[in-house]
Amino acid sequence: MYVAVKGGEAAIGNAHALLAEDRRGDTAVPELSVDQIREQFSLAVDRVMTEGSVYDPELAALALKQARGDQVEAIFLLRAYRTTLPRLAVSLPIDTAKMQVSRRISSCFKDLPGGQLLGPTFDYTHRLLDFTLLAGGAPPRTEARGELAPDLPQVVDLLNAEGLIEPEIPDADDAPVGDLTREPLMFPAGREVRLQNLARADEGYLLALGYSTQRGYAKSHPFVGEIRSGDVAVEVEIPELGFAVDIADITVTECQMINQFTGSKSEKPKFTRGYGLAFGYAERKAMAMSLVDRSLRAQELGEDITAPSQDAEFVLYHADNVEASGFVQHLKLPHHVDFQSELTLVRTMRAEIEAASAPVAEFEEAAQ
Amino acid sequence: MTLQQDYAANAAQAPLEGYNFAFLDEQTKRMIRRAILKAVAIPGYQVPFGSREMPLPYGWGTGGMQVTAAVIGGSDVLKVIDQGADDTTNAVSIRRFFVRMTNVATTEKTRDATLIQTRHRVPETPLHEGQILVYQVPIPEPLRWLEPRETETRKMHALSEYGVMHVKLYEDISQHGHISTAYDYPVLVNGRYMMRCSPIPKFDTPKLHMNAALQLFGAGREKRIYAVPPYTDVKPLDFDDHPFEVERWPEACALCGSHDSFLDEVILDDKGGRMFVCSDTDYCGERQAAGHRGHMAAPYKDEAAE
């Protein structure tokens, strides 16, 4: 008899109960708290906030807990929650020159006004598994936490004096700023829309694209002008008050990439910029983003478009991991109606070929 | 009509706490309704809209869900189908979502529904005036597999430059003897815009033509909405000497005996045994209730025995 290969509400309910049980794991092991995730998996939290487009470490940690540590699933949870949030105000642009930095480096200059600060970095660690963590050892105490004076000039601006680097001229304050969370992506996409797309983009995707530019697919001769991480104030202008008020401090990582530009018919040789910004400590993301931002400027700078990383439609349409993950995984959904149509078609076509080739086979036999 | 819904009644029909009626906030619904109105005004034209992240993944019906959320009202009766069936997992999941978020009545009966969200099928039972059929669309652009660039395809639509599709269909005929598009068959709407009918089998394509219901198409990930208003001309692309044809089955439905419906093939064993049954579960059930029997149907049950 006909047994439907169809799932009902009960099957879905059971699947979700199993998921909840597996998420918890062995109940003999103490449950992980959201606070523990926020404090001890802070880089995972930072990534979820960046790609989830919500700066809220607690919600990002909750999403990670609910998603069993799956980053893309956690990002999706946070995005879906974001949809329901009202938009109360638009902040003023953050001023990263006024950042309270905990890390600041430049690969272009040996020393800089204001100094360099390594900060809490994996760089120069030897990647040896630390078995004291397995045994629950406490980290060594440190007095080494440094701070640079706020109001550090951007390294790239130091090159401005000679006109060696393109100036970054902000748009007029009242110029419209695109917002991908409110309007669909349209082309040609302005740089602000491209940067928003890249900020929300999957880190692995940006990393691979950025990497491709270093291996000759749209070579852009990059140097790290500056990477800085630290806290910046978010200010909102309150119409009733007529002045801006600090509403929060957020941690961000910013990367200014400097790229050689050999000049074109109309432009003298100079250095150009690529820009990356991410919530929290997210250096890999910010660096990759700045490489891709720069390569997407090919058209504006009159460069030949030869590589995937320069192709705005290709890069921007496929950057979002919530979109990509959903569409790739929708192939799990039943497609038996379309498949039935294809089956019918393929059978018809095969039958036609068999019917057409049969007399030819007889003819060949006769000829032998 | 659901577009003139009574907001107060909707608000009173309290959904899940902390969420607005039908999940989306009223401003977002307005934005989507404006896109729908534009789509209705320009049949077959893909209207870009500010698609939102929904709590279900992209590719799983977020476009259809946003359209449904924008037009649904407290008095609507909702039907959700996937592959023609009300009980497929994703249909169950989407129906549950709207019950949680709106408390509206649901039905499996095509004729009783005011609003039907579908994936991959058009119901067999003809729709009537006042009904809305919402399609979930993965890729709205009919020219996408011939031209991957959106900037190009938008120009092609603007200029009605559809020769490339005719060439594709012609090449099919010259290579295979007939058009090898089994589903997602391209159509021309109202004599102007080429449209993708979401991936419905070409069996369903003729149902779009002059349909009494309003047909709305939502593509969430691709951020497009388009529409076929009631009684609109929808013509599948074909050639005079190779007219459009729908697929046919050598058998009738094994449960209800229908010769006129789209049949799913169900494999019964590993020796090539198979049966064909209606993909539209409501249609098949209604026929069986009316006494129609296929060759593998359960014997007629006496109502008194139930």
Image (cartoon, coloured by chain):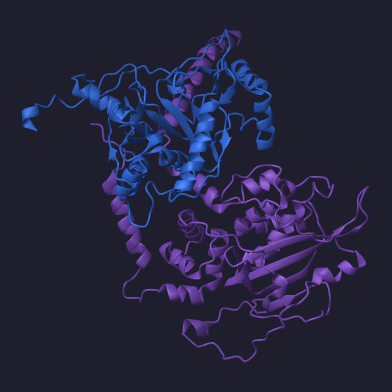
Name the spot of residue B39 as percent of width and height, x first: 53, 30
State the residue in front, B290 or B268.
B290
State the residue in front, A105 or A125.
A105
Report whether A174 appears left or right of B248.
Answer: right
Quadrant of image for the C terminus of chain A:
top right
Quadrant of image for the N terminus of chain A:
top left
Residue found 31% across the figure and 72% down from its top: A27
Name the spot of residue A46 as percent of width and height, x first: 56, 68
Number of labels in the image equals 0
Name the spot of residue A299 as percent of width and height, x first: 80, 46
Residue found 48% across the figure and 42% down from its top: B30
Q: Look at the picture and state if A311 lies above or below B2.
A: below
Residue found 84% across the figure and 48% down from its top: A303
Report whether A127 appears left or right of A305.
Answer: left
State the residue in front, A317 or B299.
A317
Q: Which residue lies furthest to the left in this view?
A: B304
User: From where the camera sits, is residue B149 visible?
Assistant: no
Name the spot of residue A50 as percent of width and height, x first: 58, 63
Q: Look at the picture and state if A252 lies above or below A310.
A: below
User: From where the camera sits, is residue A194 visible?
Assistant: yes
Q: Which chain is blue?
A: B
- Quarter of the image for residue B171 reads top right
- Quarter of the image for residue B206 reads top left
The colour of chain A is: purple
- Quarter of the image for residue B247 reads top left
Q: Look at the picture and state if B285 lies above or below B8.
A: above
Q: Look at the picture and state if B153 lies above or below A64.
A: above
State the residue in front, A44 or A244.
A244
